Image (cartoon, grey):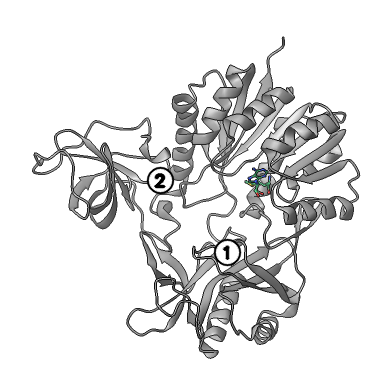
Amino acid sequence: MQDELLTTAAPTPSRQEEPPSRTRPERGEELELTIDSLAFGGEGVARWGEGGYVVFVAGAIPGDHVRAVVHKRKRSYAHARTVEVLAAGPERIDPLAQHPGVPWQVLPYERQVEIKQDQLAEALRRIGGLEGFLLEETIPARERWRYRNKLEYSFGEDPKTGELLCGFHASGGWKRVEPITDCLLASERGNLARELTLQWCRGQRLGAWDRHRENVGTGTALLRNLVVREGRNAGLLQIRLVTTPGEVDVDSLASVLAAELGAEHLSGVLWTRSTALAETTAGGETDLVWGEEALPERLGELDLRISAEAFFQTNTEMAQELYGLASSYAALQGWERVFDLYCGTGTIALTLAPRAGEVWGIELVEQAVADAIAAAKRNEITNASFFAGDTRLALPELVERAGRPDVVVVDPPRAGLSQKVVRRIIDAAPKRIVYVSCNPTTLAPNAAQLVEAGWRLIKVRGVDMFPQTPHIECVALLERRKH
Ligand SMILES: C[S@@+](CC[C@H](N)C(=O)[O-])C[C@H]1O[C@@H](n2cnc3c(N)ncnc32)[C@H](O)[C@@H]1O
């Protein structure tokens, strides 16, 4: 949905050289385009031909004149990838990182934040039809680089030399892995952990798993992914090697990592064997090879342990800002019953617990729920309870068991809340809803449904968790109108 939505800044169609008489370009065709604006999701938006056919262009920003190749074509729009920037737009700056995940690094950081603020307003007004709320100024990131506490790398092979590589899939080229030597989103220590693992894999003569190859999962071509997670405040790393099932001397990998990184900086080494056809680091069978199963971390006053399968906000420093904002929007006085839906390891509920009467969390991933329960105990928080379940089914059960909530906090995945879940929240009738969203284009229709049902959107504020990328995180406060 987001790709098809233009920003308000969208433009008068730009004039292309030699306007073609066709109304749509072909797949695989190269076009010369001038970018007018940025779409949700971060692609540049250009118009092609006399009819102003819309082309979303990856790797381009407003004002750029680019050569781009069409890789997907629909009736009313196409997606293209920049092949060459023929003339740079006025705001373009030199990129710092060789990284497919940071397309906005060519924009000055202040502009990135401004655009995110505009896109947030745009989503709420245009998609949600929402008016009359306060849009607070977006909180900028504290660190513009090296802010991620979790990196998932892929293994691949150099197409010419066959050398084992560890890096990211090239944008638009899922079969190819681009090696990386210094990932500017990861800490230096996280980079070192990846390099040590890669050298060790090369020494062991292990190869990359490739589901397109005939020998998939046989012999030594086992390596799928490397997950490097970091407890930033605790100063600890967790390394998880993901392979297809087979023989791997993971004990020797753990010895190398402990010796080279320093055992005091390594919390655990894990090994996941996965038979999934898709490239995913979730699922499979995970064994602890060295150290502790869960990654220790501190967040504010909280002493946490995060399991490999559990979600944790990927920008630790900004997670504290996010939770601080959610907490101020919740405006608790000490007596309220609070539900934290989609609670992950319970971090929001546990942050709110000292200012609430009681907090209850619901989360789908059992490991995360176990982490939340253990964290409540470890931090001596006695008014917090957590349950594993799908919010849609578990929420009505929780209302029956605990009573109606005064405040509901929701923090769903990018897809937002289904209409059914919104109806369950409406049935639960909280006075206040604090909606933490990583996607304003799904927040907007959810908020509109709540407004329709009797809540008022009071205020919204962005928190920049993901500098150099188009991702927008925000918190919204809705209050029930008096009956
Ligand atoms: C964006 S994360 C938020 C987690 C947590 N609030 C935090 O800040 O760490 C969304 C969480 O929703 C969980 N989830 C996804 N679908 C769910 C569902 N249907 N019911 C309950 N939880 C779900 C995911 O496992 C994930 O932990």
Q: Position of residue 319 (x, y in %)?
A: 66, 48
Image quarter of the N terminus: top left
Q: CA distance from mark 2 to mark 1?
A: 25 Å
Quarter of the image where one finds residue 385: top right
Q: Is residue 286 visible?
A: yes
- SS class, disc 1: loop
Residue under label 2 = 42
Total residue callouts:
2
Q: Which amino acid lies under the numbered mark 1 shown in the image of this protein?
A: Thr
Taking the spot 43% from the left edge, 44% from the top edge, the residue there is 41
Q: Nearer the viewer, residue 281 or 219?
A: 219
153 left or right, relative to 89:
right
**Which residue position is annotated with label 1?**
281
Residue 325 visible in the picture: no
Determine the image quadrant of residue 362.
top right
Some atom of ligand 1 lies within 8 Å of the CB belonging to the residue at label 2:
no
Query: Residue visible at 84% across and 34% down?
Result: 356
